[in-house]
Amino acid sequence: MSRLVAVVGRANVGKSALVNRLSRSSKAIVTKVAGTTRDQNIMAVNWQGQVFKVCDTGGMDLSSKGELAQKTNDLAWKAIKSANAVLFVVDRKSGLLGEDKDIFAKLRKLSKPVLVVINKVDVDKHLNDLADFHTLGADNFWPVSALHDVGIAQLEEDLAQVLNIRPVMLDKKMALATDIAINDVSSDGTLPDDILSDDIETSDNSANYEHKDGQQEKKKGKIKKNFIKDCPTLVILGRPNVGKSTLANRWIGKDRLMVSDNSGTTRDAIDVLINYHQQNILLIDTAGIRRKSKITLETELMSVKSALRSMERADICLLLLDAKTKFTDQDAKIVSLALARHKPLIIAINKWDAYEKDSMSTSSYREDFFIEQPYLKYVDIMFISALTGQRTYQLLDRISELYQTLHKKISSPDINRVIGYINDNYQLNISGGRKFKIKYATQVGTNPPTFALYANFPESVSQDFERYVLGQFRKFFIFRGIAIRLFWRSKYGKQTKKRGR
């Protein structure tokens, strides 16, 4: 059984820095700004061949009545209740505050181990500053510096003992295999999992919903989520407050991610694993991406950078738009970033339930959208409501299809039949009256589908001709919504151009 440790405390005591140190990653955003973390961020810790999970939580504020503070507190308590042990983090520099006492008073009532971690104890002389913390009445303290890796080894050893974890003796080859297994979970070393305990049963959305006349109908059924290697990674992108976390929560089946009418609520890129029709899908919920000139806070800048890094490790990009607002230059910028990385793209128009419409609204919206953005005609547009669930599971169906298409392999005879059609129906004019011809083509890769095309004058290929070739490939091989890469080579095998979209 995988064990979970909740890392809690008031804002800006160094919880995210401690989680990053324990997990040997830098995924959790760390700044000097209080309240940077808001959502639960679960990562894997490899301690001497054994793996357990740590859950980073937002800074708790029991006295605040604000909406964000209340939601942050609620998510933190959910993590605490599901955890096998709790790390309560306090700050040596600011000393013991009343907020610390209030939180610890509630924690000590729990029937589970609570370890008091005093952070920012950077050097030995700082140990003289800890007298006030003894008034908490805790049995023991763990002075550490998450930033400088002081006291972390002792904390890990004692935490493993509390969790009843024993080290596994590994030779070098086995130790390497263990590290690879952890890194297979995610490129950042995180454990993308929305379950807070392996003992908790969580909803399998394919079991809980079935489609009837275009509607989702709730029905009973629970299943444990099992992580497997072969699962699509979907990053949810968009401007602030378009409903990214609401959509993720809809698919998860519970309020795992914080949702608020205030823009910029999400800051960390959060990995969550769901299971839909026996297919695991890794969701990455990201912060809203605004224009650079609009970004004024360090936390927002780091959140945007985290969102862009998430795009790199995703298989598929989902751009979420608000039905009540127009497609903006910033949306176009997000699209261009996805296309530049050759990522499959799907566009979902959210809040469709609040859009004034008639029976032809979806057709009219698509037609107007493609007139304004003709370069996206190959991309699917779906109309959803994350709030009500309208078409959100049809969207998952389409995402699963895209993932399968990403790995589609086309035989060389089929490819060259299409090449023959292209040669017969498009005459590329080149200087000197010479006739351009594609000699043959073959698929050389998947995810994204990649083709090598051998021609007599590859350096003469124009953008218009390449768009035609891409269009024919999408038409004949059903690559809708998929970015395709083309390598143009001479008939002697020398590569001259690399393009695609």
Image (cartoon, rainbow, N blue to C red):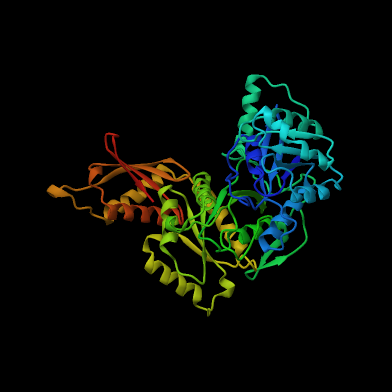
Pick whichever, 86 or 476, lies toward us. Answer: 86
Residue drawn at 57 percent across, 67 percent down? 384
Q: Residue 75, how many percent across, how many down?
A: 72, 54
Residue drawn at 43 percent across, 43 percent down? 411
Q: Residue 174, how many percent across, how many down?
A: 66, 23
Q: Residue 376, how many percent across, how many down?
A: 41, 60
Q: Residue 465, how many percent across, how many down?
A: 28, 53
Q: Is residue 333 left or right of residue 262?
A: left
Residue drawn at 67 percent across, 34 percent down? 121
Residue drawn at 58 percent across, 42 percent down? 27
Residue 47 vertical placement versus 37 (above, below): above
Pick whichever, 294 or 124, lies toward us. Answer: 124
Residue 374 vertical placement versus 468 (above, below): below
* Residue 63 in sight: yes
* Residue 47 in sight: no
Residue 206 vertical placement versus 119 (above, below): below
